[in-house]
Amino acid sequence: MAARGPNRRAVLGALAASGLLSGQAAFAQAAPKLVVIGGGFGGATAARALKAYVPAADVTLVEPGERYYACPFSNLVVAGLRALSEQQFDYADMAAVGIRHVAARAASVDASARDVTLEDGSTLKYDRLVLSPGIDMRWSALEGYDETATSAMPHAWKAGAETLRLRDQLRAMDEGGVVVMSAPAAPYRCPPGPYERASLIAHYLKMEKPRSKLIILDAKDQFSKMPLFLSEWSARYGTLIEWRGAADDGRVVRVDPQNMTLHTDFDDQRADVANIIPPQKAAAIADAAGVSDSTGWCPVNPVTFESTLQPNIHVIGDAIIAAPMPKSAFSANLQAKVCAIQIARTLAGAEPAPTVLTNTCYSYVAPDAAVSISGVYSNEMRFADVPGAGGLSPLDASAAERAAEATQAQAWFDAITGETFGA
């Protein structure tokens, strides 16, 4: 295994040792109103961390759903290797740790008045607001692809009903059929996600419909863990997978759901099953709060995660501009903790302090084999790679090493969901 960065516990231990977590007794003297919008890996973690670091605070989590479906591991559901119920988590444990869960959608934010308006017209006052809104699809970015098109061509980039729809379409496809995936240009949620999905779909086809084919039409010429994926595809799936990058006319410019056709600049590709992963942006509440810019994403102070566009609003997770740190569950979880620490320091009258951030991302290439990438990032002036830190799984790893990484991936998933949702 190549060199790796520290895990989340090591990072938080380092923060404590450096004094970033010092002065916690002072945090309990105030009773600020802290509101978190979004109940995923960023938002649910932020709510817990804020309550832990500012015990006297009134912490409210605004999340309309009573349950959450995790995107990590959802590609296993697509391939029929995992039940969707194993991806389901809820917020029942929040009250036990002193967090109020408001099961409503946030409609707007008034940054000057410091209040959040809910869909029923009621409002929540805040001293500090943390937004972890996740993503929305850019429905206008790909001609022919809108919300109605997802019934024929699901994106399944938010876990739930569409995950099952794509799974069921694969099951219903005749032997010898053609599956076509469309991968977008960066940035988007989970950079290696399309290629993990391709690996697991290819495994399903190899086992169940070996005369079928998977074609990946990609708007990029490079992608995360590319050498690892290409090597594994060649060894495991041979000609069953065909990847076409942008330079090989892989960029999809238009789709026709009625005729199940994807159009590139110079070619038309018909599909029996089509998985369109469209361009993305920060979710709508980011626009309503005035924290997203012309890119569709949210610029933040890299130390505090406070919006550079609105005061007293912090943004974390997939919605933010944090490259080279990727949009991932691991990133959102750690950003939530660091953001909560910085809010706690600010409330206690201490100056925010820079630290380091990490990310590790596992990708299954088969049911019993995975590869990974790790990164370490500084945030003193901007988000930046720490030279020489992090790394990739070895290209020439043995089957036992790939299997060990699959086991590590499961352990990581169990740990992060337990920490986030109390599961």
Image (cartoon, rainbow, N blue to C red):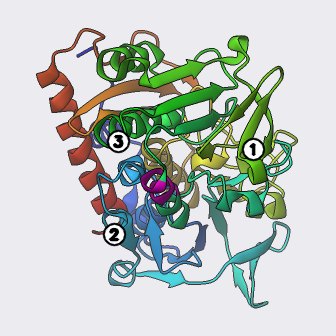
Q: Which residue is mark 2?
A: 85
**Image side of residue 252 versus residue 237, left or right:** right
Query: Quick one: label 2 or label 1, which is nearer the N terminus?
Result: 2
Q: How many marks?
A: 3
Q: Is residue 176 above or below residue 377?
A: below
The three-letter code of the residue at mark 2 reads Ser
Dot 2, crowdedness within 10 Å: few (<14), some or many (≥20)? few
Dot 1, crowdedness within 10 Å: few (<14), some or many (≥20)? many
Task: Give coordinates of residue 413: x percent, y percent.
Answer: 29, 50
The three-letter code of the residue at mark 1 reads Trp
Task: Give coordinates of residue 25: x percent, y percent.
Answer: 37, 64
The alpha-carbon separation of the residues under discs 1 and 3 comes to 35 Å
Q: Give the position of the N terminus as an image quadrant.
A: top left
Q: Which residue is mark 3?
A: 204
| Range of residues picked out in magenta | 166-172
**Image side of residue 234 versus residue 180, left or right:** left
Q: Say whether marks 2 and 3 touch (CB < 8 Å).
A: no
